[in-house]
Image (cartoon, rainbow, N blue to C red):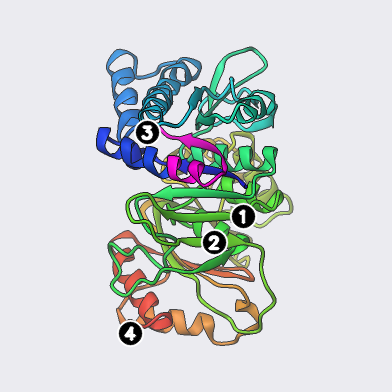
Amino acid sequence: MALIVQKFGGSSVANAERVMNVARIVSETYKKGNDVVVVVSAQGDTTDDLIAKAEEINPNAPKREMDQLLAAGEEISISLLAMAIETLGCPAISLLGWQAGFNTNSVYGAARIKNIRPNRLQAELAKHNIVVVAGFQGINRYDDLTTLGRGGSDTSAVAIAAALHADKCQIFTDVEGVYTADPRKVEGAKKLKEITYDEMLELATLGAQVLNNRSVEMAKKYSVELEVLSSLNPIPGTIVKEATKMEKMLIRGVTKDKDVALVSVLGVQDNPGVAFKLFSKLSQKNINVDIILQSFGRNNTKDIVFTVTKENGPVAVELLSDLPVLDGAKFVCNTDVAKVSIVGAGMESHPGTASKMFEALYERGINIKMISTSEIKISVIIDSEDADRAVSAVHNAFIPND
């Protein structure tokens, strides 16, 4: 007998038919003699619908009240799923995040899990109940409901698996696993049998939407083996696990991210401490910076170019324009860009990987604005309109369509 945590996203429970499908998957796992904890997201577009309702009332609603509202989506789905499981003859109980022991910090809308007290979970499992838990939510020290942000249900599932020392954490989605690219847009995209935590983390961070990057970080930290598989097609998925020793370099995936803004600060005085003061200002406002490029000084000035999310581009320009050390500098924010990346372990020890990627883009007439590399990824910033062509070109260069 094993302890298995299963997570189902909003599309998997979007309507009554799909709720019953999920109930059958969970019940079959339980009837094989396993203990089962199920983590569920809000149905379909429920979260977006709730956000729209809030905007009708108050476009600038307090974040605390937004969390109170959004937590209701998961409350609906866990209750319905528990009812569905009961109709199939299996005992089930639904628990909200706080009932399942989720304690978070007080950053409303993007809370972080501080700890899980699994007493209630363990007690219900001891009664041989299937425990259906609301993902995406918890409670803070003020006894206020909090939400974990988009993709938070993945993180909830991994956190439960870690707290209970589960044998496996299965993430059910509307795709059959992790692919080398989006199979809906790239012909010849291949499903991977397995992938390392580091590779999956890079793919998730760089735009692949199959797993939330925070969930992968947590899985790696607590050695939780993940399996990504389809809730609609019962076939083996992709295993996410520790790396095994290998000499061969494999490109695991090609991703794109259009939520990018390119901010240029031109004509900055070439003095010590300017970069520190610039990026400290952004850090104080919790603006995360990705790729950074600084030119060589000329005429006692230099240019600093960096990327942030599209939403934070104009905010960054506004913040920095008031910084005294940037007096006289010119600011440009370009939101019509995208980041295209390749990910694969062993990249740094295999010469020619970057040139092969750049050649594929050159042959399609795609201009590169910025480049960033690490041991397992290469990212380029290009015009947004070229993103889909770029992904196809690069994918075909490294993973030809057989």
Q: CA distance from mark 2 to mark 3?
A: 29 Å
Residue at the (64%, 32%) spot, across then down: 113
* Residue 28 within the magenta-colored segment of the rendering: yes
Residue that carries the numbered disc 4 in the rendered image: 402
Residue that carries the numbered disc 1 in the rendered image: 225
Q: Which residues are magenta?
A: 26-41
Q: Please, what secondary structure does the residue beneath circle 2 have?
A: strand
| Label pair 3/1, CB-CB below 8 angstroms | no
| Label pair 1/4, CB-CB below 8 angstroms | no
Q: Amino acid at mark 1?
A: Glu
Q: CA distance from mark 4 to mark 2?
A: 23 Å
| Label pair 1/2, CB-CB below 8 angstroms | yes
Q: Please, what secondary structure does the residue beneath circle 3 have?
A: loop
Residue that carries the numbered disc 2 in the rendered image: 239
Residue 246, x across and y down, in percent: 66, 80
* Residue 150 within the magenta-colored segment of the rendering: no
Q: Amino acid at mark 3?
A: Leu
| Label pair 3/4, CB-CB below 8 angstroms | no
Residue that carries the numbered disc 3 in the rendered image: 88
For marks 1 and 2, the one nearer the N-term is 1
Residue 322, x across and y down, in percent: 55, 35
Label 1 crowd (10 A; few <14 / some 14-19 / many >=20): many
Q: Between residues 394 and 320, which one lies in front from this camera angle?
A: 394
Q: Amino acid at mark 2?
A: Ile
Q: Is residue 77 left or right of residue 266?
A: left
Q: CA distance from mark 1 to mark 2?
A: 7 Å
Q: Does residue 344 appear in the picture of this structure?
A: yes
**Dot in front, 4 or 2:** 2
For marks 3 and 1, the one nearer the N-term is 3
Residue 44, x across and y down, in percent: 31, 36
